[in-house]
Amino acid sequence: MPEHSFYDHALPRGSNQLIGLACEAAIYQRVHQDWCAIVAASPVLESHISEVDTMVCSADEIAALVGQASDIVIRQSLRMIAELREFTSRSGIPFRPSTTSQVTLDLADAEWEQHLDQHPTYTKWLLQNSPVTCTRTVLLEAIERAPSDVTRHAMREVLIFRDAFELAHGRVFR
């Protein structure tokens, strides 16, 4: 959604913010419903995912979920959580996988890189607009622009993680 449009002058003050929030909610709802359907297709893994809080569990628990995921969308979404947790470990929140778990995560990283190689325009865009530090609007655009379910749901995980991190630590990514 552009920052300013022809309709800015015709709408009551604050309407653009309400429209923006409604668009954000619609994007999230659509992607969340899609995610629920993808996870439901793997009932055993769905059960394991529901038992683990990926925001606070150990690196080994996330790596175990990555290793169990037969669906690339789920595997890469979980890999993204591991990457984000590793990123925040620099802020003093420990995230240290065992050697075996690190191998699992490294294999998932290689798979992610291969997937991104299939989408060079999006990859270039991601390099220019870091999903971890960009504004919320840019991150939502990354979700909307995603060329595949794999990238869309990985970006969805970034959005969820950032929201949780903001609530827990007061860090705002806007």
Image: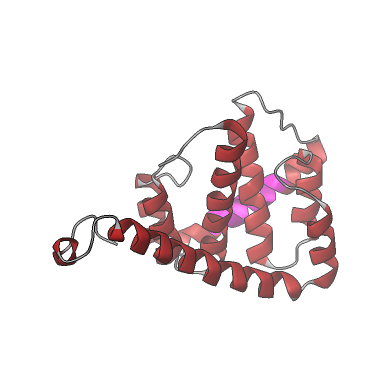
Image quadrant in which you'd find residue 112 = bottom right
Left or right: where does residue 15 sit relative to residue 48?
Answer: left
Left or right: where does residue 32 sit relative to residue 16?
Answer: right
* Main SS class of the magenta portion in the image: helix
Q: Is residue 79 magenta?
A: no
Q: Residue at x 45, y 47 (%)?
A: 131
Whether residue 119 appears in this view of the structure is no
Q: How many marks?
A: 0
Q: Residue at x 40, y 43 (%)?
A: 134
Q: Residue at x 84, y 59 (%)?
A: 48
Q: Residue at x 78, y 58 (%)?
A: 49
Which quadrant does the N terminus fall into?
Answer: bottom left
- The range drawn in magenta is 105-114
Where is residue 54? Give x, y as percent: 73, 47
Where is residue 97? Give x, y as percent: 76, 36
Image quadrant in which you'd find residue 50 = bottom right
Q: Is residue 108 magenta?
A: yes
Where is residue 138? Give x, y as percent: 37, 52
Where is residue 155? Give x, y as percent: 52, 56
- Name the residue at the top extreme: 92
Whether residue 117 appears in this view of the structure is yes
Q: Nearer the viewer, residue 9 or 78?
A: 9
Q: Nearer the viewer, residue 80 or 170?
A: 170
